């Protein structure tokens, strides 16, 4: 994940330094990074909520969902915006090959966009994560950037850069999402075990008290019976 | 400068993946086995039209998936 972060942040540094800004009327593609498996706390809801917020701001954005859990949540509210969904995500540590395959599929489907936003869970620490976004800009948006003249680029390379930027950012989102999910799963499991343990203790006490109360009342009966003789 | 692979219809990402595969296959036995594990992907995707999900199709890593 650290490596993916380094690659990804250098990528976004390029866009920040070139001062790339999306136009108001530009089309947006929202890529929601999640996974197929549950029992990981609020991971999927956090990403779904963030995606829904973006769609509310730009109602004609298109959405690509990675992972069945997020797909289920998003298809309840923004069905009509979804263009593609992927599954078999999150089974193992994400590889760059997967990210490339996803990016290639998106590009092959000829989904037009001026800006792609990758919504993922940023790994803040072992116990906390936060939904965050990575922007990826299309060639035309990038070539209109404020500081574009500071870079010497030949035009043909821009399309390659766009493809690579998309794959790189998807890989970063996948890696961080995976890390956040694993951490959240671990803490969810720990909490569940702790709660179950507490419940067992409390119930054991209640059971023993009940048992002792029954024995005490039986003893009282026997003793009063014996003393009556 | 126009790229030969671009003229042949391969995207930049496909091109880098093919090169990576060639490099992985060129490694010695041990390292190759480790590296080839990074080359696998078993993702499936489905197209959605107006709120309805199409059928799930696996991504064909060799051919890329041409939109049919």
Image: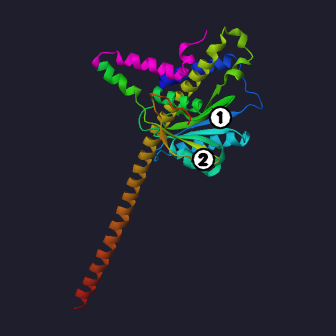
A105 w.r.t. A155: above or below: below
Chain ID, mark 2? A
Residue A120, x across and y down, in percent:
57, 35
Q: Write down the quadrant of residue A134 in the picture.
A: top right
Work out whether residue A169 or residue A185 is closer to the camera in this orientation and state it.
A169
Task: Specify the color scheme.
Answer: rainbow
Is residue A42 visible to us here? no
The chain containing the residue under callout 1 comes to A
Q: Secondary structure at mark 1?
A: strand
Q: Which residue is mark 2?
A: A74
Depth check, front residue: A12 or A168: A168
Q: Is residue B63 visible?
A: yes
> Are discs 1 and 2 both within one chain?
yes
Q: Which residue is mark 1?
A: A29
Locate residue A225, reporting x and y percent. Answer: 25, 87
Identify which residue is drawn at 73% across, 39% down.
A58
Q: Which residues are magenta?
A: B1-29
Q: Tell me if residue B6 is in the magenta stretch.
A: yes
Residue A155 percent coordinates (x, y):
66, 13
Residue A169 lies in quadrant:
top right
Residue at horizontal 46%, vertical 37%?
B43
Q: Where is A5 relative to A73, above or below? A: above
Q: Is residue A147 left or right of residue A170?
A: right
Quadrant of the drawing holding the C terminus of chain A: bottom left
Counting from the top left corner in percent of width and height, residue A175 is at: 49, 30
**Res. B6 image quadrant:** top right
Disc 2 is placed on an element classified as helix
């Amino acid at each position: 994940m650290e490596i993916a972060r380094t690659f990804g942040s250098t990528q976004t540094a390029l866009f920040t330094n070139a001062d790339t800004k999306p136009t108001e009327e530009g089309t947006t593609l929202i890529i929601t990074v999640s996974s197929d498996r549950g029992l990981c706390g609020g991971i999927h809801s956090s990403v779904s909520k963030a995606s829904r917020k973006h769609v509310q701001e730009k109602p004609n954005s298109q959405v690509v969902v990675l992972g069945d859990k997020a797909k289920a949540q998003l298809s309840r509210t923004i069905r009509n915006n979804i263009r593609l969904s992927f599954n078999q995500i999150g089974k193992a540590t994400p590889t760059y090959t997967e990210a490339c395959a996803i990016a290639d599929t998106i590009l092959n489907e000829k989904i037009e966009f001026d800006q792609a936003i990758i919504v993922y869970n940023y790994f803040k620490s072992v116990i906390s994560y936060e939904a965050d976004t990575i922007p990826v800009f299309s060639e035309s948006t990038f070539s209109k950037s404020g500081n574009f003249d500071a870079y010497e680029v030949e035009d043909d390379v821009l399309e390659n850069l766009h493809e690579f930027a998309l794959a790189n950012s998807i890989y970063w989102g996948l890696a961080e999402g995976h890390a956040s999910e694993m951490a959240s799963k671990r803490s969810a499991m720990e909490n569940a075990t702790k709660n179950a343990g507490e419940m067992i203790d409390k119930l054991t006490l209640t059971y023993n008290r009940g048992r002792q109360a029954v024995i005490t009342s039986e003893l009282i009966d026997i003793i009063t019976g014996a003393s009556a003789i | 400068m126009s790229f030969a692979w671009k003229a042949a219809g391969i995207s930049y990402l496909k091109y880098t993946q093919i090169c990576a595969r060639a490099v992985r296959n060129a490694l010695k036995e041990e390292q190759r086995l480790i590296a080839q594990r990074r080359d696998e992907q078993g993702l499936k995707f489905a197209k959605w039209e107006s709120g309805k999900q199409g059928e799930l199709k696996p991504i064909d890593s060799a051919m890329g998936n041409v939109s049919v």
